[in-house]
Image: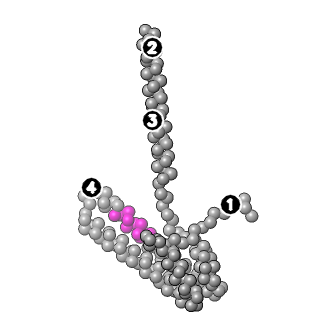
Amino acid sequence: MFKSVKILTWLVVILFATNLATILSVAYHIRAEQQKAPVAPTTEVPGDQRTRFFREQLTLSEEQVLTFREANRAFNRKAQSITGRLDILRKRMVAELTSEAADPQQLAQLANEIGEEHERLKMATADFYLEVKTICDDTQKEKLAGIFRSLLDSDEKVNLPQRQFRHKNRP
């Protein structure tokens, strides 16, 4: 009797240890996956940061800064509107793809609409560049071309300066 109690006790201890190890392993992997999950990039870049960046890089005069700021605001409004429509279209495409009976014609239509919105975004960027170019002298135009070349990475995503975090306790 004592031997069977001892065996059952060890069996319970082993099962408890196995369950505890499994729970800890699952919790660890869930946390690791959450940390690996990419954070959706924000498309909103503060206009003041962009203005400051271009002002410093191109050494814009105050008059040029005012013109740039107006062009930048117009571009931001247009780009955010297009980006919002792209987001809606992508969600509709995912919904259609994951539906029980995905309609190839509907998917083709959504893909076409997404392409049109991408074209509008590229043209808005080109219009912004051309507008900024009109306020620049020859030296600034060369710098502007270099900036636009360096801002576009291999995926054609614009890498604009990001907002730097400020600590509340700093003066």
The tag earlier along the polypeptide, 4 or 2, is 2
Q: Amino acid at mark 4?
A: Glu
- Name, please, the residue furthest toward the top: 1
Closest to the observer: 77 or 140?
140
- Between circles 1 and 2, the one closer to the viewer is 2
User: Is residue 74 something one can see in this rendering?
Assistant: no
Mark sitting on residue 167? 1
Mark sitting on residue 100? 4
Q: Amino acid at mark 1?
A: His
The tag earlier along the polypeptide, 1 or 2, is 2
Q: Which residues are magenta?
A: 83-93
- Name, please, the residue furthest toward the right: 171
- Between circles 4 and 3, the one closer to the viewer is 3
The tag earlier along the polypeptide, 4 or 1, is 4
Dots 1, 2 in contact, CB < 8 A: no
The tag earlier along the polypeptide, 4 or 3, is 3
- Helix, strand or loop under label 3: helix
How crowded pointer 3 is (Cα within 10 Å; few <14, some 14-19, many 20+) is rated as: few
Give percent across and percent down for residue 71. 54, 82
- Helix, strand or loop under label 1: loop
Mark sitting on residue 5? 2
Q: Amino acid at mark 3?
A: Thr
How crowded pointer 2 is (Cα within 10 Å; few <14, some 14-19, many 20+) is rated as: few
Give percent across and percent down for residue 4. 42, 13
In space, the residues marked 1 and 3 are separated at their CA atoms by 41 Å
Q: Amino acid at mark 2?
A: Val
In space, the residues marked 3 and 2 are separated at their CA atoms by 25 Å
What residue is at 63 percent from the left and 79 percent from the top? Answer: 56
Quickly name the residue at label 3.
Answer: 22
